[in-house]
Amino acid sequence: MRGLKRKEKPEKKKPAKRVLRMRNGKKVRRIKDKLLQSIMPAVVLTIVVLVFISSLLTRTQLQRMAEGQLEASISNQSDNISSWLDENLEFFATAKAAIETAKPQTEEEWIRLLDTFYGFNSNSPNGLFVASQSGTFYKAAEADINTKEPTKQEWFKQGLTRIQMAYGAPYKTDDGTDVISASGIINDGSDDIKVAAADVTLDRISIIVNSGVKMDNASSFLVDTSTNTILAHRDSSMVATNLSGSNEMMEEVVASLANKDYSTKQAGGYTLAFSEVFGTDWVLVSTIENKIIMQDIVRLVWILVIVGFVAVVFISILIRFIVSRVIAPIGPITDNIGAMSSGDFTINVEHDSNDEIGLMGDEVDEFVGSMRDMLASINTESERLKTQSDNSSRVSQDMYDASQSQEEAMENLNNTVEQLSAAVNEIAEAATTLAMVVSDTKTSSDAASKSMTETVEFSSKGRSDMEKLSKAMEGIQNANDGLVESINKVGDASEEITGIVAMIGDIAEETNLLSLNASIEAARAGEAGRGFAVVATEIGGLANNSAASAQNISNLIHEIRALIDDVVAQARNSAKSIRENSELIEAAVKTFDLIYTNIQSTSECIDEMIAGVSKVDEVAATVAAISEEQAASADEILETSQSMVEKAQSITQSSQDVADNSQELAETSDTLTGYVKRFKIDKEPSTVQRTRSVS
């Protein structure tokens, strides 16, 4: 957990009203709009897919329910038919047992016995009737049965095949009635085989089949699979007819009965269900049109569509509200980042939310404060650098002026030395002439005395000039030492700026790391974090730009440092040359002292020559020797003076180089100031101290 402690908080400045800007020629879109445009289609598509899947599942479920209801209905019908048949068959079996117990012999006994069963069972109103293999036929007295050849009847043939009463195949009676008979052999103790039978009309079975349908709009029909005869049908004209594939649905029925495949299936737009009637070869077939089943499905689909539309509207409003609440803090942060990208660091970032956005705003606010203080420090150091560069320029100008004065003094000294050399040569010539013409007049001695006096004056003047030159060289050396000290201060200032730039780089790296962490968190958030990923990328780009600017400033400072090192090296070379020139000047001063002493001695000798002409030969020889030495010394002094003139010119050139370097340093300071002025900060930089604590 991070917290910020601030001793001084700058006055908050509200960011300008947000407007959509242009970026790379394209209109910038709000994150809110992008989120809504991304989420809403997904929501609508999801609801549509859910409605579609629900429709399919509902259709499948309703189809299964319809099939289950149809199967339950036909199973119930089959059970009812089976129960009805068993009930009738039980009655017939009881009557057969009663006949076998009574064992009637005469026709009257048969009629009387059969009369007891007449009308007893409403499903078989004619009761039982009996036929023997010999052709005898017995029935109830009131039974409406007319049979001429009973042994040729279908019920007799079927009855001969079984002992117990059982139903046979349907057939038409002589009067054209569709019936089905239950028949079986009677054991009456006689040798004549007899068959008892009872007719059940198929109309009664059709009533049971049609009335037993429990599913609305469904229909059923009963088929005898042994002969493919329809036993019961809603359409009475179909009863007792053979089953045929008149359409796709009937073809499927025929195929299923042939293959004994009694599973529920679809065919010809119908749902088909099959059920075997227990104890018979009968199969009950139930059908219902699929469009009847689909009516409920269509109605339910419309209900789902309406509910889905209402859900889309409600969810759209809810998502818009939630997105607005979630991304509301991003707007001010985006505006502040835009202001920072344009160089405005007078802003304060609002970060009231307690989530990642609030943490991002907190870090951006800290970055803004750090950048504001850092830019203010850079601006101050830039001003100091400019002041120091101006001082260096002024000092170099003073040194240049002093070196020019030194050069002029050295040129004057050179002229003086040339004059001195000429005078010494003249003295030597005069001394030689004096030695040769000892007998010259006193006028020549006066001229020599006058020349010697002038020589003394020139020596004195040269000695004074050399002392002035020595003092000027000391001033130049002191100015050069001051320049070196000023340049060293500039170097120290550049080191401080380098530290500040390094701090900028560290802040940029930290900001880039925060941007990377925000991108990772946005990637974990998935689709809802894509907007946060964009903001994190923008902050990372800003951090990279800050790092690049810091690197540019660091490169400039390194160039300034290299220039300062060059200036220091040149200043040290100048100081070395000045010290060497000072030593030469001191040597020249000593030489002038010797010359002055020698000239004074020469003057005394001339005085002695004037006083004692007798000693002229010795004095002339001595003066000639001294004059030759003085001529040699004057030549050396001339060479030394010329060398000092050249060194003074070199010092002047070095001073000019120092002045040029100071000017370049001033231009570099102006460039650095221009970089800093691109950013807007408070007039009085805030001294915000931030400390972080991790708990």
Image: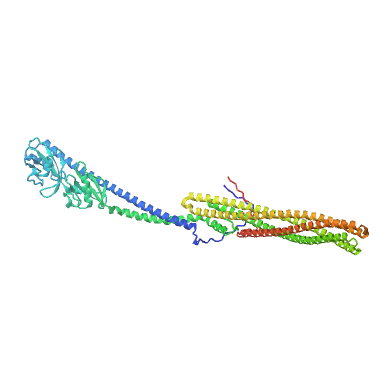
Count all numbered tags in the image, as a single digit.
Answer: 0
Q: Tell me if residue 683 can be seen.
A: no
- Which residue appears farthest toward the bottom when viewing the image? 443
Q: Quadrant of residue 189?
A: top left
Answer with left or right where residue 1 lies relative to residue 225: right
Answer with left or right where residue 124 lies relative to residue 362: left
Q: Position of residue 307 (x, y in %)?
A: 38, 55
Q: Is residue 677 above or below residue 117?
A: below
Q: Is residue 675 above or below residue 68?
A: below
Answer with left or right where residue 328 lies relative to residue 307: right
Q: Tell me if residue 621 can be seen.
A: yes
187 and 608: which is toward the camera: 608
Q: Quadrant of residue 596?
A: bottom right
Q: Which residue is rendered at x = 63% and y = 58% of the image?
A: 672
447 and 342: which is toward the camera: 447
Answer with left or right where residue 431 lies relative to residue 32: right
428 and 360: which is toward the camera: 428
1 and 388: which is toward the camera: 388
Q: Position of residue 693 (x, y in %)?
A: 60, 46
Figure coloring:
rainbow
Which quarter of the image is occupied by the C terminus? Answer: top right
Q: Position of residue 476 (x, y in %)?
A: 75, 57
Q: Quadrant of residue 678?
A: bottom right
Q: Position of residue 217 (x, y in %)?
A: 26, 52
- Which residue appears farthest toward the front when viewing the image? 436
